[in-house]
Amino acid sequence: MRRHHRTTPRISRLLGSLLLVAAAGAFTVGSAPAPAPAPDPAPAPLGRVVPAPASVEPGTSPYRVTGGTGIRVDDSREVRRIGAYLADVLRPSTGYPLPVTSHGQGGIRLRLAKGPFGAEGYRLESGRKGVTITAAEPAGLFHGVQTLRQLLPAAVEKDSVQPGPWLVAGGTIEDSPRYAYRGAMLDVSRHFFTVAQVERYIDELALYKVNKLHLHLSDDQGWRIAIDSWPRLATYGGSTQVDGGKGGYYTKADYKEIVRYAASRYLEVVPEIDMPGHTNAALASYAGLNCDGVAPPLYTGTDVGFSSLCVGKDITYDFVDDVVRELAAITPGRSLHIGGDEAHSTSHADYVKFMDRVQPIVAKYGKTVIGWHQLTGATPAQGALAQYWGLDDTSEAEKAQVAKAAQNGTGLILSPADRMYLDMKYTADTPLGQDWAGLVDVKRSYDWDPGAYLPGAPASAVRGVEAPLWTETIQSSADIEYMAFPRLAGAAELGWSPAATHDWDAYKVRLAAQGPRWDALGIGYYRSPQVPWPAR
Ligand code: ACM
């Protein structure tokens, strides 16, 4: 992650405990006499973590990271790599060497062991002698490392040496996720984002144990992934964006780099090719894909629902087969998202016919279908997941259609637009974003239960949640961050934390403690008045 450069005022210990209150703020003195040692401030409470851990047992003695601390890892490449990642986080701000070794005693230990951790869970034990993170799988160690970061002072995220002390509260955290699917979507079609911008977002998602990055790779305004057998999709279809900028696309090497980087943070990339609607960029690139054989112009506006692949033409399925084959070949994850939303220019009969032909193509290339929930109006394939993006006031009939599919075995990913859409404005004054699903401040975004959300859908059908970010109005990493933070943290908690921990009043206090961390990371967030942020 690109770190924010700023000078941090030195904390003055000149007046010792009398001015302990100054230790929380910034108290600058020119050339001070030798400072008297101040008592250590208390470490952050063990449970002050987002997402809330499943279980927290406070202990008595904190662990202090010092210049003598080592990071001890199992002698395996992957655990060593996680140790190196942790060292990279801790070294710039502590200034300590933090060697990563597979021998020695005490310090920070990362170990794999059999235990009741599942694929992503971990145990973190902290005391006077050290911190040990144990997990059955490397992903669990990585998530435990994120917890450890949050237990250290926010200044640990800075990129220059800070005074410390670096205390981790004592005790034991046992933690594992409520849902296996904890996603965030980035729309790279309406505005294109570079590999570096996507990787920055991946780092931010990893902080909150998000494990799926859904990339919306195609839409009316831009096709963003190179397909060798249909090269104009990217070179022409990717050549613009909303408001007519130059757009862009990922080469296969770029896409593989995003996949690799995501995997190094234990996120899986879920690529989406939206069809049969939202396809103007493809239709503009190849005249033959159009029912009338005439390519429309490129599109840089923000309307939806005007484009459709030609359901009656065989070339449509040759196109889909080629795109899915090439995309599946560079996607190690199990899922491939085929869109299916807002196909307002496709008749219902054509929509059903299209999905009946396209879903088997996805299966042929070894992937599982994900579609927006309109897919439940066709016949979802065995194992398909439907991503629900309705609102409180979506019709009962539409909700019932999704619930019925869920009863019949279609898994659900919940992205209710009036809760989880990160592009909705927080308030009427939010300078970015849209408001068609309403205004979504932090409490509304957090305060619902995915397990009991959709009437008639069994809780067991819910595979997780996802926070999509559509980018009609979003053009930079700063824009992404302002809309994602703080709401993304709540979305991540809904996906990770047990329902029993869900409590707005407790959450807003844990969330407030993230503010200084985002400041230290250079993440510009919306300081919602609903959250008791510490003064800056
Ligand atoms: C969507 O917002 N059209 C999925």
Image (tube, rainbow, N blue to C red):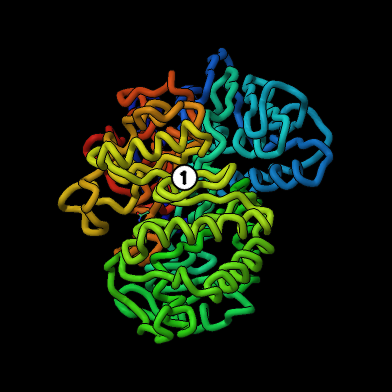
The residue that label 1 is drawn on is: 386
Looking at this view, is 327 or 401 the one in front? 401
Give the answer, above or below, for where 435 lies relative to 23: below
Q: Position of residue 296 (x, y in %)?
A: 36, 83
Q: Position of residue 520 (x, y in %)?
A: 43, 48
- For image coordinates 37% across by 68% down, the residue present is 190
Q: Is residue 520 left or right of residue 70?
A: left
Give the answer, above or below, for where 220 lies relative to 164: below
Give the answer, above or below, for where 204 lies relative to 44: below
Looking at this view, is 33 or 291 the one in front? 291
Looking at this view, is 522 or 43 the one in front? 522
Q: Position of residue 187 (x, y in %)?
A: 42, 61
Q: Is residue 282 left or right of residue 365?
A: left
Give the answer, above or below, for where 87 lies relative to 351: above
Q: Is residue 236 left or right of residue 527?
A: right
- For image coordinates 32% across by 44% down, the residue present is 390
Q: Position of residue 524 (x, y in %)?
A: 35, 53
Instruction: Write down which quadrant ligand 1 falls in.
Output: bottom left
Looking at this view, is 197 or 39 the one in front? 197
- Report crowding for label 1: few under 14, some 14 to 19, many 20 or more residues within 10 A (C-alpha): many
